[in-house]
Image: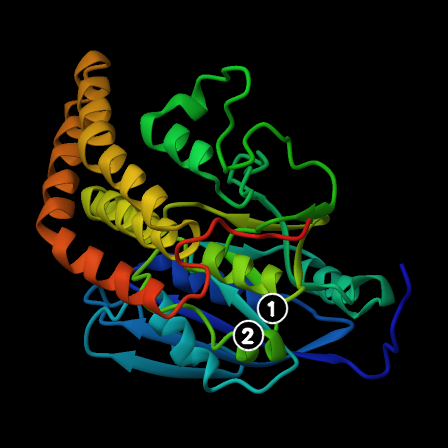
Amino acid sequence: MDAFNYKEKAAVDIVIVNWNSGDLLKRCLRSISDYPPKICEIKKIVIVDNGSSDGSMQGVNKKSIPLQLIFNNNNKGFAAACNTGAAHCSSKYLLFLNPDARFQEGVLDGLITFLESNESKAFGICGPRLITDTGEISRTCARFPTLKTMVATSTGLDRLSLRGIKSFHMWDWDHSNSRAVDHVIGAFFLVRTLLFQKLNGFDERFFVYLEDLDFSLRARRIGYRSYYHAGVIAFHEGGGCSKQVKALRLFYSWRSRLLFVFKHMGCLNGFIILLCTIFLEPLIRFLKGLIIRHYQESREAITAGLMLIQDLPKVLSVALKTNKHNKNFCKSSQIKR
């Protein structure tokens, strides 16, 4: 890998969206404060609070790092909050960081070194190896979805290791080596700022979930790829504050899936996934919960399903408006690989 001029440190701004993250945010900031960047410079850390009510923002301004705090009166959604934070940034690179993620030694320098190298000109997004608190590697990269993988995900067939059926989540790969991938998870998402601006940021119609996958796909369509860097490590708890509202998390996951499919995979595929998501997946999850006696899981499936049905007119309205302005609306995604 070709090195770049270390005398000119690459500037990085960090955007963190907080929503009732408790002590996770403070641990995240502490890891940044304790991180000694060698070949990059952290110019600014923008924290956008989405109407938290747990006191998680109290005392964060006392950290010995360059903080800028933005307070929303209510939860405007993850994508919108990220865009708000990015609008206050001007460095060469943007790092979107979850409150439940933490820096490990050399992680940011390693990602910047790769993106600054001559061989990385085709890459606009880079993410590290993520580990859990037990040291286990999180399998967080993804393939761009197809109708087959979306149906498999919705029905749970992707978890049965059946021949010819895979999830768009890359659970079948151990994530132990660096490689180009379709998508790296948004928990530790390093982006070239010019690319982020060119794509007008995240699509705010995704309230939460899949806004990062949508961004990766749009980046790919204009020639920028994503890179998974297994040589550097960050900690990611996973779930974070959304663990508090599992039914709501499931609802937004389903909602974003429908928006993604309608936006990128066409009308017919959208309605196929719609039927699977409304009629099959809640039932499968409900029965699974009964069988394994996780009754809370059954209740969450029914609650999320009812929420989705209630919100369906709005979801379809948003999806159809999105596709009206998308030249690929009624075509399958044409991705150069």
Left or right, 26 with reference to 11 = left
Residue at horizontal 65 percent and vertical 37 percent from the top: 175
Residue 185 pos. (x, y %): 52, 51
Above or below, 298 against 110 in this view is above
Disc 1 packing (10 Å; few <14; some 14–19; many ≥20): many
Residue at the spot of label 2 = 196
Q: Is residue 289 above or below residue 12?
A: above
* Disc 1: which residue: 191
Number of marks in the image? 2
Q: Quadrant of residue 25?
A: bottom left
Check disc 2 and give the amino acid type. Phe
Residue at coordinates 56% horizontally, 67% vertically from top-left? 32
Front residue of this view, candidates 299 and 241: 299
Identify the residue shown where x is 57% and y is 52%: 334
- Pointer 1 and pointer 2: residues touching (CB < 8 Å)? yes
Where residue 21 appears, x then y in whole percent?
A: 32, 59
Q: Is 277 drawn above or below residue 286 in the view shown?
A: below
| Residue in the image at 33% along x and 50% along y | 267
In the current view of this chain or complex, which residue is farthest to the right?
Answer: 2
Q: Is 203 placed left or right of 129 in the picture?
A: left
What SS does tag 1 mark? strand
Tell me the amino acid under the disc marked 1.
Val
Q: Residue 143's x, y, as percent? A: 56, 42
Tell which tag, 1 or 2, sits nearer the viewer: 2
Q: CA–CA distance between discs 1 and 2?
A: 7 Å
Q: Answer above or below: position of 170 versus 257.
A: above
Q: Quadrant of residue 207?
A: bottom left
Q: Is residue 310 left or right of residue 124?
A: left
